[in-house]
Image: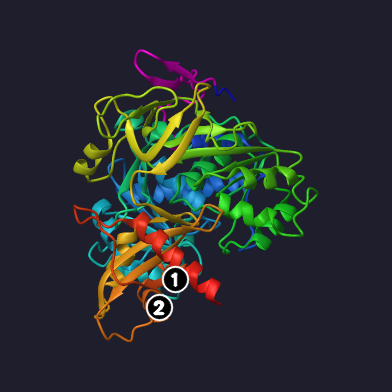
Amino acid sequence: MNYDTKFDSEKRIWSNVAPDRLFNPDKSIGGVALHMLRAQPPNAICQICDSEETELTYSKAYSYAVSVAAHLKGLGLGCDDVAGIVAYNTTLLMPVIVGCWVNGVAVNTMHPIYEEDVIRELFQVTKPKIIFCDGVCYEKVREATKMLNVPIYTLCNHFDGVKKVEEILLPVEGESMYGAEPLKHGANQTMAILPSSGTTGVPKLVCNSNHKLLVDFCLSNGSSVIFTFATAQWNTGISLMVVNILCGGTRIVTTKSYSPEYFLELIVKYKISMIFSSPVLVGALVDLPQCTQESLASIRILVITGGNATRSMQKRIRDKLTNGYLLNSYGTTEIGAISVNYSQEKAESVGRINIGSYVKVIDPVSGNLLGPNEKGEIWARVTGDWMGFYGNAAATAEMIDADGFINTGDIGYIDDECYMYLVDRSKDIMKYYNFHFSPTEIETTISLLPDVLDVCVFGVSDGNGMDLAAAAVVLKTGSTLTEDDIVKFVAEKNKVKHKQLNYGAFIVAEIARNVNSKVMRAEMKQICLNMESSKKRKI
């Protein structure tokens, strides 16, 4: 790939200009998908679902997509409508999404782990006219969407008396000649709506245009066996779905939860050749005693996403990845891929600017544009307009400047050889596996305890790219509340793992604040870690 980044010293912008595109962004991704599915050998395996023990051929994926498109058309749904999807990577998810795109319907995807209130609030914004969900989360989705009064179809784990997707997968007369609806709003028509990282409460809804989804991808080909644990609510999950459709090969999917042992089992069983995964998951994989060079011999491309792998982790991976390349990437939900590092020489870097991307570094105080080796806020844009947050013009305006650059929220710099480095986060963001969260959410939960006077939540790194939430808590005089009580209370209130106190709680005398009464998280973190260290020394 061409990562020939250039720095314009006059404009102070780094760029990697994209070549002419293979796919015309003015053509519907639904139409292109139908063409590419039709072009494959009909009995070739497009997708294998390990958990459901199913195989999906290209011809069957095409037929199912046409059936979904025809059903939506019969309901009168088109380019100004949205379909809601709350699902894991199941057998029928891909053809349902393609069917929506064929009819010009945008998909608003969510992870089934989302709480009922979050699903309700997000769907109140996008107002889907039809919803597809996994059976395991049907009751939650039904309760969250009562106000919409729209049909809900389960994709798997069906219930008696509940609509299931198979009911609409009916033969369509002349399906081999079925055509997609043309784009009503051009290349920038919204085709996917993905939740943001949700670092300040309920996630925002990021619009992904037809232009953004219909990308050229040169890392894959018809012989690739593709895998990621990421679901369609993340850029990685939906992008690899598109790669599978446009470039061919076989995509492995599963609804089973991650474990390093299961990850290795899948790689060996299916001879997976291309993987997109977070550093946490890959780090645990290569640290398994049974993970050897031989067991990873099938891998040709391993792309790190959703976090930066440390130098030591990269070395551990490369020591066992003898037949493939390790790529360390950086991007955001709003922008997509911003930079990629395929070099071992600058392992701390997130690489050079990705094809079709532009980056500038801004002093957060003065607003001045900075040059090489000067630290500031990273702003980026890609070819094609960013369509902003769905139904939230104010939040969109805060994120984007007049030139179309988006604030990533990260602090970093770019060196003399155009390699980018991230050094800090400009916002209070924590990450647990692929989920981002704000400390404020956990602080709000802890504050529900009557004995709590003050609280500060911070993250402690586990050394593999994950932030383990910890809380410093001030109690009322005479309170008998213990640190374990606080941890258990949060676990009971916040059912999702990433919003729990995975590092623990510390009872302190006061919370450190600056002159503006702002909590000093870094100082409180150090105070608590010193307390922990002192306890260990006494033991």
Q: Is residue 18 magenta?
A: yes
Q: Dot 1 surroundings within 10 Å: few (below 14), some, or many (20 or more)?
A: some
Q: Which residue is mark 2?
A: 483
- Eyeballing the image, is 249 above or below 170? above
Q: Quadrant of the C terminus?
A: bottom right
- Which segment is the magenta one? 4-30
Q: Which residue is mark 1?
A: 504
Q: Which secondary structure lies at badge 2?
A: helix
Q: Please state the horizontal and vertical placement of residue 84, each as a whole percent of the image.
A: 36, 55
Q: Amino acid at mark 1?
A: Gly
Nearer to me, 521 or 159: 521
Instruction: Name the dominant secondary structure of the magenta segment.
Output: loop
Q: From where the camera sits, is residue 292 visible? A: yes
Image position of 260 (left or right of 68): right
Q: Please state the horizontal and vertical placement of residue 381, each as a whole percent of the image.
A: 37, 29
Query: Within the image, what quadrant is residue 164 found in?
Result: bottom left
Which residue is painted at 55% across and 62% down in the image? 255
Q: Please state the horizontal and vertical placement of residue 76, each as a whole percent of the image.
A: 29, 48
Q: Please state the horizontal and vertical placement of residue 199, each as a whole percent of the image.
A: 34, 53
Query: Within the image, what quadrant is residue 356 found in?
Result: top left
In primary-sequence order, the first of circles 2 and 1 is 2
In the image as oriented, which residue stretches furthest toward the front?
Answer: 538
Query: Within the image, what quadrant is residue 122 found in?
Result: bottom left
Q: Is residue 460 magenta?
A: no
Image position of 98 (left or right of 183): right
